[in-house]
Amino acid sequence: MTLDNEHTLILPLVEDKNDYVCLPLAINVILNYWGEYNLEREAEERSKKYNNIKGSIFIEGIEIAERRGFLTNVHKSNLKEIKKKIDQGIPSIVIMPGLNETIQHATVISGYDPSESRIITYVPEPDTVGSIPEKTFLELWEQDGSIVITIVPKDMKDINDKDAPNTDASYRMCFECERLLYTNKVTDAIELLRKAIEINNRNDLALDMLGSIYNEIKSDEAKTYFQASIKFNPKLYLSYRGLGNYYLRKENYHLAEKYYSSAISINPNRFGPIYKNRGFIRLKLDDKNGAKSDFTTYLTQCPNAHDKNDINLAIDELSTSLR
């Protein structure tokens, strides 16, 4: 595609291998864009605190940026603000739905094309960018709360504060909570999320995270927080999935199927394992055709699943019983 250079930033190429537990690729790219390099040593040192963690701990990367004098902001945003930032020379990081086996991922917005109504995203390959129709981008972004992270030099403080005043710390607290959970500090995480909700009782992300923690510790409070999250964001995929998990744990299979199906209707390709869960539920409900279909979809989306052989065996047994 031909880029609209007026509204597109040229970001430095940072290879995928430079994606660290404590320095997500997206943050590494932004800091390189602002001329900040040689971040790997601190990232590796910070990572020693965490063992066998897959993915990235975003708050660690944010703190690396702040240690170098950058200003950061984590908040709920909109497309108008992102475009304005691009025109000011400021790229943004957004949290987006994952695909198949990845539940979420961070994306760097590097531009927009007003003539084609498309959002331009960073791709860690030479001479390559991503391009998403604005309507599709908004639908996907909304599924995770329309969260944006900005990182700017101190001398751009006035611009940054004017457009996105850093008065609501509740979204940053969600990222701090994520770090607590990685270190099994569950009680501290609950306390922090409760404080985030006191600051902003409409914070759908905090409500969802608190629901997930309560579900993990088998507390019935989980349902209340998932429902509140959905009230404020009817497209929050994770809360529908969370309610599915809640009702599966309670062995209320009809409601579990309902909420898993609601999540799938929002985004059928986001997270393959949800099909395995719904397939199990459909077996319990004696819906063999539905179970077979779900198990098949699960393996299509997660071809390297650790339980692939067991699921294939279940599919074969269902096929035999349906003849």
Image (tube, grey):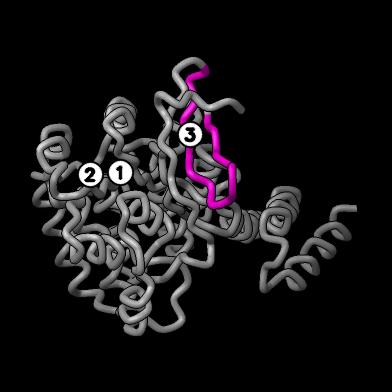
Where is residue 215 shown, x and y percent of the image?
35, 65
First reached walking from the N terminus: tag 3 or tag 2: 2
| Residue 148: assigned label | 1
**Label 2 element class:** strand
Q: Which mark is residue 75?
A: 2
Identify the residue at image location x=24%, y=78%: 185
Between circles 1 and 3, the one closer to the viewer is: 3
Q: Residues within 10 Å of mark 2 (few under 14, many from 20)?
A: many
> Label 3, on which residue?
120
Q: Any magenta on residue 155?
A: no
As drawn, 282 above or below 162: below
> Circle 3 — which element?
strand
Q: Residue at x 48, y 20 (%)?
A: 117
Part of the protein shown in magenta: 116-132
- Say which label, 1 or 3, has the lower sequence index: 3
Q: Residues within 10 Å of mark 1 (few under 14, many from 20)?
A: many
Seen in the image, is 92 located left or right of residue 305?
Answer: left
The three-letter code of the residue at mark 3 reads: Ile
Q: Residue 88: horizontal and vertical position, in percent?
A: 27, 31
Q: CA distance from mark 2 to mark 1?
A: 6 Å
Q: Determine whether the residue tagged by mark 1 lies in a helix, strand or loop.
A: strand
